[in-house]
Image (cartoon, rainbow, N blue to C red):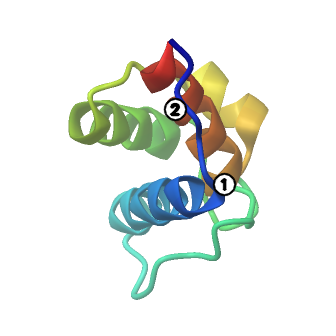
Amino acid sequence: MTVEITSSDAQVMAEQIAEAFKEVLGADEAPDTHSGFLDIGGDSLTAARAVSLISGRLGVRVTVRDLFRARTAAGLADLVLRRQAA
């Protein structure tokens, strides 16, 4: 069985991930979902906190390596949705 991932699914997931970025970075607002995590002030320590928060909330294992490869909330959302569908 194939699960179809829609652009609205991806957008909702990206916004949830951006909200996690906001929390770990102590920002006033969630960043744009296409902003790079490192570009908005993230580092290896905040990345570890972010992936722990994201994994716990979304129920899918996400690693720091995943975050650094995906770079953005939108990119990470695509990865998470693929893992959920698998």
Disc on the earlier residue, 1 or 2: 1
Kind of residue sitting beneath label 1 = Ala
> Is any part of residue 20 visible from this angle?
yes
Q: Is residue 77 above or below residue 86?
A: below
Residue 36, x across and y down, in percent: 74, 58
- Element assignment for label 2: helix
Residue beneath disc 2: 80
Residue 39 shows which numbered tag? none
Kind of residue sitting beneath label 2 = Val
Residue 27, x across and y down, in percent: 43, 78
Q: Is residue 36 above or below residue 22?
A: above
Q: Which of 4 and 74 is in front in this view?
A: 4
Q: Give the class, few, some or many, for how many residues have Cα within 10 Å of label 2's Cα (few <14, many ≥20).
A: many
Q: In this view, does 46 lie above or below 27?
A: above
Real-space Cα separation, disc 1 to disc 2, in angstroms: 10 Å
Q: Quadrant of residue 42?
A: bottom right
